[in-house]
Each structure stands twice: as structure tokens, then as C-alpha cells.
Image (tube, rainbow, N blue to C red):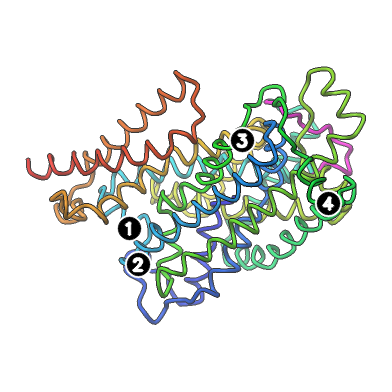
Amino acid sequence: MEQTHAEEQVLELASSTGGEYEREAVPESRWKGWKSFLGMYAGEHAAGTEFVIGPLFLTTGVSAFDLIIGLLIGNLLAVLSWRFLTAEIAVKYRWTLYYQLEKICGKNLVTGYNLANGVLFCFLAGSMITISATAVGIPFNMEMPRLTDTMPNGITWIVIVIAIGLVISVIAARGYDTVSKAANWMSPVIVLAFLLCGVVALGQLGISSFSDFWNIWGEGSEPFPGQVKYTFWHVVLWSWFANAAMHIGMSDLSVFRYAKKASVGWTSAAGMYVGHYMAWIAAALIYAVYLRSPEVQAILAAGEAPAVAPGPLAYNTIGIFGIIAVILAGWTTANPTIYRAGLAFQAVMPRVSTFKVTLLAGGIATFAGLFPAIAMKLLDFVALYGFILAPFGAIIVFEHFFADRFGVRRFYAEKEKVRFNTAVFMAWIISFAVFYFISLKFDVFLSFVTLPTWVCCGVLFLIFSRYFQKK
């Protein structure tokens, strides 16, 4: 799922071309073919989050059809979004998301966006630190957090999380070249670990036919305590919008601006069907093995929720290699996430050095990692993340496709020297407030309202822009 490796991809592409082109279009001499993106997407979406997301699908009581077919369709919709929205606009202008937003929204509004983005990245990195801690804690016989845990469960947990967070933060703050190269070397190892976990778990479950595999989920079941029951549409919409900030939110403009043509957007399928489809199902399989143990059956019989701890799950499946894979998956995800959060904060505090703001981001992420609730509620957090940030992508999409038809001037903030585009802010705040209220008031799953919020924001942007520009 990991949306945060986008910055890693951009920097690696940039470092190989001699510049990041932060405030200019990428020149033709620096454009890349599909091979430069295929492995990139496959690796970035096989991340630490996958070790949690797969098991969490089982805790929602989802059926086999809803999970397997729902993921197939949801990930396809994500690929189509990357191909026909993100990549299409990226190769048209070849700007970063932030530069293009600045031209439309104004510098002050983009600064606010960066602050929100940075905070959300810190919380996401915190969940990665939590995931790595479940692996590091195995030799210390650490008590693992349960699905319903919100607070730290002991001093061992606190010490391990702080130690991991400190190491990750310092590495991220010292620079990104080494981090990005190491992550690319580690990605194939992580993908292999997921594949091995799935294969070994099939043997442990005694699966000898497709019908046996299907019956792991069967017709579904009641969700675990504190979890929401997932249906077909829950799976489709959640998997579509798990990376909403990246595709319909346009964050991957920063990646695809290097593509020779828009068709390179199809390479996102490698991420969706290797990193997501395969990895999520493989992670669900190792959790299915865990659920059959007498210990877990006793926990469920008592009406409690068992742990969803990636470290022990992977260790029980493929041994020491599983522990290494979980640590690497969390490390390679948290590092670029903290680095990216640091860059976002630096936009708010430009006089503070990158080293210091990255350490600040790492400190926030480490503090967040102390609380298992973020990782244990990762499905809900990812839905919220996309819901908040995706509508800003609608501003870019609707201006690109409909500005001329509605008589709206493109890149209005840049042309009129506007630092805070009121039309953009009103469109976002109204669409966010209305649909978030609907979600809370009527207990509507947040992914169900992400697309309506996105469309509403785009339409309101055109309406308000036409009014304010004429005025």
C-alpha cells in the first residue's frame, strides 16, 4: 500500500539525471521508459503496512468472494486512476504536485497542505515503527499488542519503539541517497518474503486445492470485537482508495513527470497486483494459521480480539527470515516517510535545517509508534488519509479537463500573484465537512464517501473559481 515511497522514487530518478526539477518541467532528455517504473512500483507497494493489512481483512469477517474478487476490481480501479488521471496530467506539464498546486492555490495554501501532509506522514511512519517493533521484540519475549490495544503495554515495548525510532530518524536526517539505494536493494527481499510466507502458510493450512484455499474465508464470519464487518463494496472501495492521495490525489505527478508517455502509468499494476494483491493475501494466510492455534481459539472464545503482530506471524511461518523481512519492510517504509514529512515541515519552517526538521518528524513518528492503535486501526487510518488529501487532486484534475468549458482561467494564483486561492479552500473545506459529517452521523464507511467528496470538491472549485475570477 505504501504511498510514501513516491518521494524515494522521485529522488532516485532525479539523482540519476542531475537535478530534481522542483520548479520547472522535466526536460525531454531526462524522460524514462516503462522499465524505470515497473520495479519501482512493485517494490514500493510491498511494504511494512502489508503485513498488517492482510490480517486485518480477516478480522473484518470478509468472505472469500468479497476479498478475492473485491481486491481484483479495487486494485484495477486504482491502476486506471494512475493511468488516465495521474500519468495523463503528469506528462502534460511535467511538474511536481507541489509546484502545480502552488500555481493554482497560492503559496500560503500549499504551505497548509504541506503541514497536513507532514503530520499524516508522521503517523503513517509511526505505524511502521510499531510493525518493526513486533519483530525486534521477539528475542526479548515482549508482550505483543492486541487488536484492541491503544496504549503502550509495557516498558520493553516503549524502549524498543524509541530505539527503532531513534535509529530511523537519524538515518533519515543524515541524507537520502543511501536510504533510497538501500531500500531498492531490500525491496526484492521483502517481496520474496511475502511470497514464501504465502506458500509456507498454504502448506501449514493443509491447502491442496483451490476450493480449500477459497474456504479459508468461505462465506465470511462475524468481525472480531471492535472491527467493522466488510462486504464486497468495502473491499473494492478501500483497495481503490488505499492510495487515493497518490493517484486521484495527484501526489504521483512527481513520479510520472519523468515518464516518456502516459501509457507508463500502466506500470502501477505491478504495485497493485504484486505489492497489494499478492502481499495482502499472503499476509492474511499467515494470520489464518495463527488463528487456528489453541491459544487464539481461547482468546476468541472469551470474546476478546487476538494480536495482529507481524513479527511473530512471519517468524512462525518462515523463521528468522520472517523477522528480518518485517524489520526491513518497516524500516524501508518509515525512513522515506519521515524524510518526506521533514521536507513538508521545512516548507512551513524554511529557516530550520533539513536535519533538524527531519529529526522533529522522526520524534513525532516515534511518539505515534508507541501507541499500537494506529497500526491496529490501519484500515481506518489509510481511509482517513486518502479522504483528507485526495480532494486537492480533484482541483488539478478538474482544472485540467474542464477549465475551458467552465470559463475558468488556468493557474490563476500564479498569474494574479494570489497567495491564498479562496476558491480552492472553500471547495475543499465544504466538501470535507459535508461528507465527513455524513460519515460520522450515519456511520458510513469513510471509503464510501471519498469519491463523492473528491467530485464535489472539483465541481465546487470550478463554480467558486468562475465566481471569484469574474468578481
SS of the residue under disc 1: helix
Separation of residues labelled 4 and 1 (CA atoms): 52 Å
Tell me the chief SS of the magenta region.
loop
Confirm whether the magenta stretch covers residue 86: no
Q: Which one is earlier in the sequence, the residue at label 2 or at label 1?
A: 2
Q: Label 4, on which residue?
A: 209
SS of the residue under disc 2: loop
Q: Label 3, on which residue?
A: 368
Q: Label 1, on which residue?
A: 99
Quarter residue 180 falls in: bottom right
Of tags 4 and 1, the one toward the viewer is 4
Q: Label 2, on which residue?
A: 94
Whether tag 2 and tag 1 are in contact, CB under 8 A, the answer is no
Label 3 neighbour load within 10 Å: few <14, some 14-19, many 20+: many
Of tags 3 and 1, the one toward the viewer is 1
Q: Which one is earlier in the sequence, the residue at label 4 or at label 3?
A: 4
Q: Relative to 42, does residue 207 appear above or below in the rendering?
A: above
Could you tell me the amino acid type at mark 4?
Ser
